[in-house]
Amino acid sequence: MKKAFPIIFLSIMIAIIYMPILVLVVYSFTDAPNIGPIHHFSLHNYVTLFTREELTSMIWGTLLLALGSALLSTILGTLGAIGAFYSKKGTTTFMNSMNQIPVVNADVVTGFSICILLIVTMGVSKESYIPLVLGHTVLSAPFVYLSVVPKLKQMDGSLYEAAIDLGAKPSVALRKVVLPQIMPGIVSGFALAVTLSLDDYFVASYTKPATFDTISTYVVNATKGSQTDIKTALWALSTIIFAVVILVVVIMNLSGRRDTKKDGKEASI
């Protein structure tokens, strides 16, 4: 019983977490207009998803926003983590503390603040994408920082010092010594930034132009409407997002295991 209880408990928790998603996946392959009895299985929702222009434009716009803001967040978060790591102890502690505030801060506060600062105070046009991109960058950069800092602490700091002693410029040592060692943290931070941008609703709803919708804002508006085919097509979209997330997690885990085995072999040699 002592051995079986953890397995049973873990199985129940996994079922609670993933059962609703599995039900959604099943319904995405049906022609049911609402959650209820399933009469026929169909690819109608996926056809609608990829043939309706408003849906495809919304998806591509969201992806471009997520990738662009994630790139900016990764650059800023990585540079911030490196700068804080190589600073004096007091500066490092201050930077770590300041980075925690946006992480625990409510997204609605971030959305309001960006909106008031840029649109109201600085007079940026409401149809500009600058507040939206900046808002998602502010939202994601602290999480990139948190992903990079552990890798900085794990790396061999003597390699950077050795590169400087051998005549390398700090920028060259950073590019050829530090960045390769912390690259797993940078990649993880980028992936997390993309996910945060795709999932965000509050910041986007306050900073986006009126003619633009992200997946989150579109889903909220669509659920209030009466177009059944749009609602059911979003089931298909949710299924695809879930499948992509699983694929990315599997690839990252396999890559991490391969790197761990490689490091273990090099250490044994």
Image (spheres, rainbow, N blue to C red):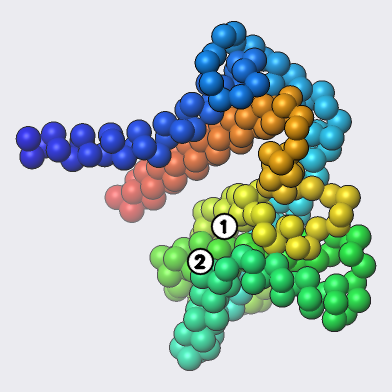
Q: Quadrant of the N terminus?
A: top left
| Residue at the farthest left position | 1
> Left or right: 255 with respect to 109?
left
Q: Amino acid at mark 1?
A: Gly
SS state under label 2 = helix
Mark 1, residue position: 189
At 49% from the left edge and 26% from the top edge, which residue is drawn? 23
> Left or right: 201 with respect to 101?
right
At 85% from the left edge and 72% from the top edge, which residue is drawn? 119
**Neighbourhood count class around disc 1 (C-alpha, 10 Å): few under 14, some 14–19, many 20 upward:** many
In contact (CB < 8 Å): disc 1 and disc 2: yes
Quadrant position of residue 99: bottom right
Residue 173 can be seen in this image: no
Horizontal and vertical percent position of residue 203: 70, 62
Q: Is residue 146 above or below residue 94?
A: above
Spatial CA distance of label 1 from label 2 is 8 Å
Horizontal and vertical percent position of residue 145: 56, 68
Q: Nearer the viewer, residue 184 or 44?
A: 44
Quadrant position of residue 134: bottom right
Q: Nearer the viewer, residue 267 or 98?
A: 98
SS state under label 1 = helix
Horizontal and vertical percent position of residue 190: 61, 54
Q: Nearer the viewer, residue 174 or 206?
A: 206
Q: Amino acid at mark 2?
A: Leu
Q: Is residue 120 above or below residue 3?
A: below
Mark 2, residue position: 146
**Number of labelled discs?**
2
At 63% from the left edge and 29% from the top edge, which residue is drawn? 235
Disc assigned to residue 126: none
